[in-house]
Amino acid sequence: MTIRENYEQWLKDFANDPETIRELEAIRDDEKEMEDRFYTELSFGTAGMRGVLGAGMNRMNKYNVRRATRGLARYLLEKPEEAKRGVVIAYDSRRCSPEFAKDTALVLCAEGVPAFLFDALRPVPILSYAVRHLHAIAGVVITASHNPPQYNGYKVYGEDGAQVGPEAAEGITRIIRATAYTDCVLMDEQEALDKGLLKIIGNKEVDDDYIADVKTLSINPALLREEGPKLNIVYTPLHGSGNVPVRRVLKEIGLTNVAVVKEQEMPDPNFSTIKVPNPEDPGAYELAFRLAAEVGANVIFATDPDCDRLGVAVKDGKGEWHLLTGNDIGCVMLHYILSSKQKAGTLPKDGAAVRSIVSTSLANRICERFGVAMYETLTGFKFIGEKIQQFMDKGDHTFLFGFEESYGFLSSTFVRDKDGVNASLLISEVACACMAEGITLYDRVQEIFKEYGYYVEKVVSTTLPGKDGLTRMKEIMAGLRTNPPKEIAGLKVTAVRDYLRGVRTENGKEEPTGLPASDVLYFELEGGCWVCVRPSGTEPKIKLYVNSNDKTQEAADALNDRLCEASKALMA
């Protein structure tokens, strides 16, 4: 069908929905807007769906949510006995999240699949935990993570508590594409409750057990009890779902000196105090810095709306604030876990950590120092979750820690996605250990750099929206594959990893990467530096990851600047 035919079909299919019709009629003469909404369907992949809210095939709306849910239900019903275990559904503070969550539940019920729906917003890690805890067959969370307010999304989790992998995503997509929007039916809510198909989850069923399990992740509870009350923390949930669980776990482990940014404490789908609810964005900390000055805090925590990511700002000995990068946080946590366990004699001989390929190589150096294996995965925490399961199935490694540079961290096996609550506990303990030594958390990060070398990383994102943007991204990747650079900023390219082809090429010889196919190019450079190019799976962006290292901070920064400029020129 043409773009115009798709548009007219929506007007016909949803003639009884006045709000949708009004929105569509308003764009009748806007060809560009109509094209963007109807040139393609909102894609469903391993990251589920994510898009701008609005009417149309390429927008997040109740009709796409219902269609995706029917696809999920029919996919699960290919194994009817397994489908009886049901699907857990959570949602965050975004626009339409509660409505989308309820629609998800009632479509599942209409298809005969039980639904466990949380009674209020919950973080992603609690959803991941609940899938395993309730022995459900799958999970769904309505969230667009750290995207701007006009976005929402739909993520699907497998029975292991991790986001579904490529095979399951392809199976669900196949059914979605064969499903008409008008095929999707909601069961009446009261009927679903009466039949026992819809079950509402309150605090006691999951939350208490989750918090109890997170507390077991403390490596030195005595340290927390002794130093915890002295640690002065400012916390902001950025209007999201972390407010209750993060504050609760901090209080229960002995961190009683926590001030919360009141303006950002309560859920707000407009995220009215910030441009974007992203703990990577320095602008998200403006109110937290103001409160920290009032209460004399020495550390600031921020979680994103679905509380799967944690940002940390720390004060140095001169009283100046520093926003740690995701790699800084990941490495200081990793170093603390390994060094503490080694000192206590509890570091397992088969210990392993996992990082994404776009995260810092410094983590490899730390693991080498402690005799711990480091595994690399594609971007997407589901792959770290898969690695955890592989370790458990084979019995060949004990999982110790996993992280992504985009502020995602995990030290448990009972959750299979990044966990801002887990991370809040762990970084608090690191801060307490630093206090006990008379240094700051910032000092600890600098100590690690002095021992292992200064590693600097930047992510350069180029937004390419719409149909033309998608074409341009494909052209960029195709061009780099056909004619890969021989050098970048004067550094020789020593090897090229093409994860779409699944090969690493060095001196003309190819070897398998051992990772699933993904549209990613990774250029290894002399001196251990590297540049990675990757189209985003959730946003209309192409991303450059540029990593450098040197003996001093100044030299590493200067080298990174040169690599960034040269890499951007390659893309142009």
Image (cartoon, grey):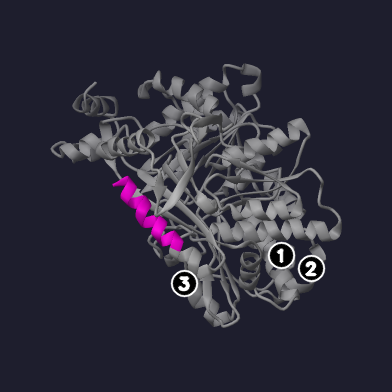
The amino acid type of the residue labelled 3 equals Leu
Can residue 60 be seen?
Answer: yes
The amino acid type of the residue labelled 2 equals Leu
Q: Which mark is residue 223?
A: 2
Q: Residues within 10 Å of mark 3 (few under 14, many from 20)?
A: some
For the residue pair 561 and 520, the one nearer the viewer reads as 561
Q: Which mark is residue 506?
A: none
- Taking 331 as reference, is 395 above or below it? above
Structural distance between the alpha carbons of marks 3 and 2: 30 Å
Task: Identify the element where label 2 is drawn.
Answer: helix
Tag 3 and tag 2, C-beta contact below 8 Å:
no
Which x, y percent locates residue 380?
53, 41
Which x, y percent locates residue 419?
61, 50
Q: Nearer the viewer, mark 3 or mark 2?
A: 2
Range drawn in magenta: 559-572
Q: Earlier in the sequence, mark 3 or mark 1?
A: 3
The amino acid type of the residue labelled 1 equals Glu
Residue at the spot x=62%, y=23% of the render?
Answer: 83
Residue for badge 3: 287
Residue at the spot x=54%, y=32% of the render?
Answer: 190
Q: Which mark is residue 429?
A: 1
Locate residue 388 relative to residue 39 in the image: left or right. right
